[in-house]
Amino acid sequence: MAGLRLGPLLRYVDWETGSTATVWVETSRPCTVEVRCADGAGGTAPTFSVAGHHYALVVVDGLTPGSTTAYEVLIGSRRVWPPEDSRLPPSTITTPLAPGATPTAERAAGDDTSSAADGRATGGPADGRTPGGPAGQGGSGSPDAPSGVRVSFGSCRWAAAPGDGNDPVGPDALVTLATRLAADPAAERPDVLLLLGDQVYADETSVATRRRLAARRDLDEPPGTEVADYEEYTYLYDESWRDPEVRWLLSTIPSCAVFDDHDVIDDWNTSAAWQRDLRATPWWHERIVSGLMSYWVYQHLGNLSPAELDADPVYAAVRAAPDGTEVLRRFAAEADAEPTRTRWSYRRVFGRVRLVMVDTRAARVLAEDRRAMLDPQEAAWVRSAVLDDPSSYDHLLIGSSLPWLLPPLIHDVERWNAALCAGVRGSRWARFGEKLRRAADLEHWAAFPDSFDRFTELLREAGSGPDAPATVCVLSGDVHHAYITEPHWPKGRRTPGTDSTPGPRRGPAAGSGTTSGEAPTARILQLTCSPVHNSVPRSIRAGFRFGWSRTGRRIGRALARHGRTGRSPVEWGREGGPWFGNQLMTLTLRGRNAALTLVQATAGAQGAQLEAVLERSLTPEDEAIFGHSTEC
């Protein structure tokens, strides 16, 4: 008899029609999975098989726009979700109002999950839909408030706490959020959760996972206590998503995800020399193929809309095969060997908010003479995704697992190191630079200077012109602390040319490669939030703080002179932070208004709780969001 192994995860919700969503599950055997909603919506999908595991991505049609409805998961006629003994609230799907629609009095009345809870308790579906909706709809705002969206984001999550309950890195922010929302179903909740990398740690496994690895193979042989193949990757997702509170949270809050290095290995694709060294090992090919296969199954598929899924030839081939393992293995091997054949980046729309999630790992060009964060095809796609139809959005969010703007000293060190590795000071300095690059993890945007400059110019373009959005925010993680920084474009400073990059153009300076004094009209920010559940040594904390200091800036300028790197096209200062701890940021975007909160998970006498350490308006009109002005 087939059962539910993992999930359900609510992944995609259609903000254009408010009537469609996707739900991902893993089952124990081949079967047909049904999602049945209280308002009559639903969908079914047969499972597909990969490496002895069985999955389904169910497209749910017929949802009521501007509502919240409870749902069940069935295999055959047997309900497998929610569990009979669950004390958590019902899993729900919340849809936005269709564009141009006006909230009804019922939808404006506020969230009420009592009918869904009653339905679950009796073992059947809830018998009605629940009013409510995204920020600015239903209980989240007045009926005549402009529709909006709450976007929570973070990265870097160790899934497992020690078995003795004493967690040395502190409470898990995702678990703490789930516990709070489960305890108070009427509490304000995110409309979407952005998981910005390191959702699993393939190279840092827990004690429990190591025991499972040891039961399969000799851990004295490479890759030791790191995962080796697809089966072992499934252990990581089991560990990450089986926690009851997290499982419920991910069944109720839609999520978008992108990988970072630890989803595969620390410092993945740092340099061409790094890649050559890893490819020479006997275990790497299976590791990278399995990493990309498992990412495709567990994370990437859910990022796509139903229309994108229908157009995906790999998805069609995997579903059509009795066993999709070899189809997916070939795809993953080709994606590693020739990254330009695969696009992991994607675009999502949340009303008047556009999200462009950028792959900053697999799309790299590593040859020192052509080194780039994004290959030319990927860069062209990102440019088009950002600049296309600017009048259609009020806020632009760019998800980049790696921060665009770092503390100035760290930025200058990475730019200097890139120049050394490129040979600007000769072969001896180049060899030293490569060793330093790997030892110090110097592989953020600043370590790809041309890409940094072009990306900076793209953001300036996106924030300029008569159709410019109110805000352009780069959302990042990776660095195990949180901070806010805002760039400034000095007048007369030369900007990089973009003539070689196809795609839409905006503004008089677009593609000119000339001196430009035109600063963007939109507010452009780097918002960095990490970790969700991890730690950072005290020495590195001190280094990050020093990176913002005046002395650190002077050292950075000296390194820039030694490396002959020239000046960056922008200057920036710290607008907030650094904050250290397990944390999540949330953007509340309504109309052309924007506000930011930062919460940290703290341990107390009553258990873990989320403590607000920042509430800040990002636009002058945001007093309606917080009820007072906290503009930075």
Image (tube, rainbow, N blue to C red):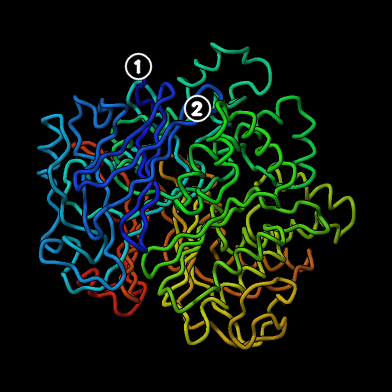
Q: Quadrant of the C terminus?
A: bottom left
Could you tell me residue 124's position as x and y percent? Answer: 15, 33
The image position of residue 288, as x and y in percent, is: 66, 34
Instruction: Using the rendered view, name the quadrant where residue 144 is placed.
Output: bottom left
Q: Could you say which is closer to the camera, residue 422 or residue 282?
A: 282
Q: Answer with left or right where residue 508 lies relative to residue 109.
A: right
Q: In the image shown, does 358 or 39 lie closer to the viewer?
A: 39
The dot on residue 234 is 2
Give the secondary structure at mark 1: loop
Q: Residues within 10 Å of mark 1 (few under 14, many from 20)?
A: few
Q: CA distance from mark 1 to mark 2?
A: 21 Å
Query: Circle 1 sits on which residue?
Result: 1
Give the residue drawn at x 26%, y 26%.
77
Which is more N-terminal, label 2 or label 1? Answer: 1
Dot 2: element? helix
Amino acid at pointer 1: Met
Task: Report the residue at 54% width, 78% height from top.
Answer: 488
Question: Would residue 479 be seen by someone viewing this image from the given angle?
Answer: no
Q: Nearer the viewer, residue 272 or 572?
A: 272
Q: Which mark is residue 294?
A: none
Q: Nearer the viewer, mark 1 or mark 2?
A: 1
Lateral position of residue 133 relative to residue 150, left or right: left
Residue drawn at 69 percent across, 61 percent down: 377
Quarter of the rendering containing residue 404? bottom right
Q: Residue, x 55% and y 41% (percent of image)? A: 316
Left or right of 73, for residue 273? right
**Residue neighbourhood size for the residue with mark 2, other residues' Cα within 10 Å, grouped as few (<14), some (14–19), many (≥20):** some
Position of the N terminus by quadrant: top left
Does residue 65 appear left or right of residue 306 in this picture?
left
State whether residue 37 is above or below residue 474.
above
- Residue 413 sits above or below residue 238 on the image: below
